[in-house]
Amino acid sequence: MKKIFLYILAGSLCFSACKKDDEVETYKEPEDIAVQNSYDDQAIKKFMNDNYLDAQGNIKTFSTTDTSDDNEKKLSDLPYETLPSGTIYIMREGAQPTENPQTIETNDILTLMVKANAHLATNTDGNVAFISTLKMVNTINDNAIPMIDPAFFYVKKAFLTNGLTRSYYEIEGFQEAIKKFKAFDNIPSGSPYNLQGVILVPSRAAFARDPHYPYIGNNSLRNYSFSFNFQVYGRKARPTDQE
């Protein structure tokens, strides 16, 4: 009897394990890229409904158990603009430079306090949402030192070797949206941050299904959308020898 019981137990554990493996959420790339584009747009809107900005402009997810954020406005309830690429940007009220604001040009050297994540959107049983989030960069929580001259905004010609093009490094939607903001007049890097806003880039305005620079180690960013939460501490014109 003991042996029979053990066999039954082993069999049930095996079935349970197999069932769990079958239930692991996986991503299946749609054959039609238009379907992925639709998933991105829907997932971005859900992201905007599920998150708000805290007192320093950080993106925060609404709590299901803590009522302290009940009066916060969803990102979707804040004024936002949608660009032709599908990129959405939000300018945070009261957080934009007022003293000598700097216009951001295409090839500027930017200094950013920034939190950037990559998100993968898919349809799970009729629910379209981001199922995976990868950290790209986080100067806010990691070291509190602004990032200088990110290649996802502008890459130097020196890196465009072996047939590589700018699209291998640069994120078009970020470039498009960040130029809608003004930079601060080179405030000191140790200054407390007050984030200016949010940029949400669908995959079609990022790397889509094209080869790209490995910004996040061995993780592919194929079909990934991006969120940027940032403050532009400063900008300066790029010297000719750094173009």
Image (cartoon, rainbow, N blue to C red):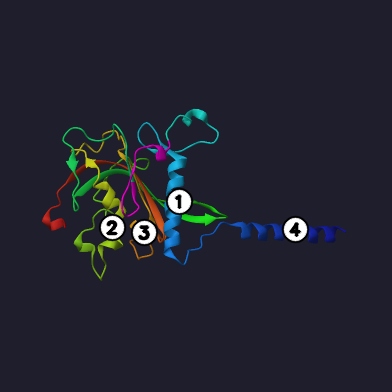
| Element class at badge 1 | helix
- In the image, taking residue 83 as reference, residue 129 lies left or right, namely right
Pick whichever of labels 1 and 3 is earlier in the sequence. 1
Which residue: 71% across, 60% down? Answer: 15
CA distance for labels 3 and 2 = 13 Å
Please name the amino acid that badge 3 sits on. Answer: Arg
| Element class at badge 4 | helix
Residue 76 part of the magenta-drawn span: yes
Pick whichever of labels 3 and 2 is earlier in the sequence. 2
Q: Which residue is mark 2?
A: 170
CA distance for labels 4 and 3 = 45 Å
Q: Which residue is mark 1?
A: 42
Which of discs 1 and 3 lies nearer the camera? The answer is 1
Pick whichever of labels 4 and 3 is earlier in the sequence. 4
Residue 215 x, y percent position in the rendering: 35, 57
Q: Which residue is mark 4?
A: 12
| Element class at badge 2 | loop
* Corner quadrant of residue 154: bottom left
Reply above or below: 100 against 213: above
Residue 239 x, y percent position in the rendering: 12, 53
CA distance for labels 1 and 4 = 40 Å
Residue 4 seen: yes
Q: Which SS type dominates the magenta stretch?
A: loop
CA distance for labels 1 and 3 = 14 Å
Quadrant where the C terminus sits is bottom left
| Element class at badge 3 | helix
Q: Which residue is mark 3?
A: 204
